[in-house]
Amino acid sequence: MSHSTVVHSAAHRAPATGPGRRGRYLALVVICLAELLVVLDNTIVNVALPSIGVQLHTDMSGLQWVVDAYTLTFAGLLLAFGHLGDRYGRRTLMMIGLAGVAVMSVGGALATDLGQVIAARAAMGVFAAAVFPATLALIINIFTDARERAIAIAAWTAMAGFAIAIGPTAGGWLLEHFSWHSVFWINVPVAVLVLILTRALVPESKAAHVGRLDLLGIALSLVSVTALVWTIIEAPHRGWLSPISLVGYAFALVCFAAFVRWELRTAFPVLNMQLFRIRRFSLPALAIAVAYFSMFGFLFMITQYFQGVMELTPLQFGLHSLPFAAAIAIGAPLATLIAQKVGTTAVIVFGLVVMSIGMFIAGQVKVETPYLGPVVISMVLMGLGLAIVQGPATESIMSSVPPEEAGAGSAVNDTTREAGGTLGVAVLGSIVASVYTSEVGPRIDAIPDLLMTPYEKSFARETVISVLEIVHRPTNPAFAQQKADLIYAMKSACLEGFQLASYLTVSASLLVAVAVAVFLPWKPAGDSVLLVRRERPEK
């Protein structure tokens, strides 16, 4: 075996031929629109969850799978598509992904049962995985100047905030006028438009040299993530320490260990484990994973809070969530540029602490808590914390890989986001479901079947979203007080689950903040040269 050394300097790259300044920024606009579509799929569906739950008679586990079916295939295939983009062309993969998202969105729009919705979401995640790593990889190869690249990455991260802003609001408006199917239909014209613009304005790029595709590594990563998330989502129903749950944890752990071992031994890994020896790569990736663990879990919980506890309409929910989204959209580009001056470490640590404070405040919310107060404050702090972390962390990660590995580096960056987000929905959602069911279950079981059918009891036992049905259900005046007491108990139990989930999130964020503060260099990266050693077979 011979050793080759890849030398990468963020500030001293040789200029590459490519589009002019106007062409570069036009391409950036199109790339950000493609990113918008992918992120929108993650946010807009949250607003539709109550409508899907009521119309398709699904429980909390089913609603979690509507979210996680997308993020599971998305997270599991990002590494694969990142490498395929390096090999066959990033623009080509992005266009295939956009076309696939459009087609699979039609499938979701025409779905008539929960299984079809979940299948469509999973297929959409597959094609979204072809789009997302290509967006960041294309930016890295189009913008070779360090300052321009930082501005472009700031715009890329700000677009995520913009998607979060318009996702719930647009979804709420659609549900106000149409059925939940409309949140799928909206993707089709957007995907087609971005596909046409990509072909016209975005230049193609690919790596000069690529190795064999690591099919075994892709399979092991996908199986390990799927097994772990499935076990966590089903744990409230089967028992956190039941035999089937323990087998699921063990199987996921064995698959993950096999994945790591294989990636360290194979000549052309889908995930270059040597990158994690670079602290400016590995620690920001960890920070992003925890930040998205918190954000996705927070979004999943706040959906239930606004629509189940506050009983808002979907459009009202979207409007009430705007402070969270605005904080991300404003904070992300500013944080990236500030990090260029004061260093990535200080900014990431500050962001994690701010996010922890926001999540702690969110966990203290009660049924009587007014919206204008702790609720808004927690959303703003959560949004700012996420924005402060993700922009500088992304720039640090992408500055640590050479341009020819931009697709792989982007895929790692995106995988940490989606893996963290998937686990956030699974873990925090399951904690809330466990607390809620244990508190509410006995009260609902005691209600005579004459007043609630077995299905209505099952639905009410699973999720606070069932309040939407119970409130509007005709009730004999003699039982009005009992109905009001039950609704209050359901809302309180849900918020107790939120509180426990928030404590877990706060602990994880603060632990990572300490790790980043201790192990990540505090000086700005500047002109430092990073060396990445990789083993390659002799030819």
Image (cartoon, rainbow, N blue to C red):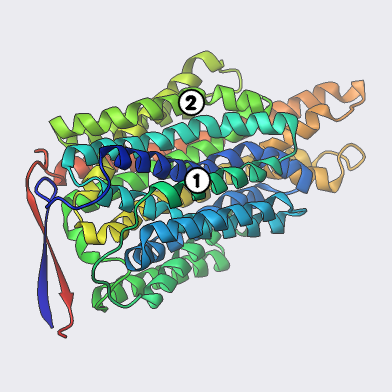
Residue at 28%, 27% in the rendered image:
334
Mark 2 residue type = Gln
Mark 1, secondary structure of its residue: helix
Residue at 43%, 33% in the rendered image:
161
The answer, for residue 146, to whether it is visible in the render is: yes
Residue identifier under label 1: 194
Does residue 200 lie above or below 375 as drawn? below
The answer, for residue 366, to whether it is visible in the render is: no
Left or right of residue 213, residue 40 in this image: right
Residue at 26%, 30% in the rendered image:
335
Mark 2, secondary structure of its residue: loop
Within-10-Å neighbours for mark 1: few <14, some 14–19, many 20+: many
Q: Earlier in the sequence, mark 1 or mark 2?
A: 1
Towards the viewer: 298 or 120 = 120
- Tell me, for residue 364, which label it has, or none: 2
Gap between marks 1 and 2 measured at Cα: 42 Å
In the rendered image, which quarter is residue 157 located in?
Answer: top left
Image coordinates for residue 74, horizontal then vertical, percent: 48, 57
- Tell me, for residue 250, which label it has, or none: none
Q: How many marks?
A: 2
Image coordinates for residue 389, horizontal then vertical, percent: 30, 37
In the displayed image of the protein, which residue is found farthest to the left? 528
Image coordinates for residue 59, horizontal then vertical, percent: 70, 48
Mark 1 residue type = Val
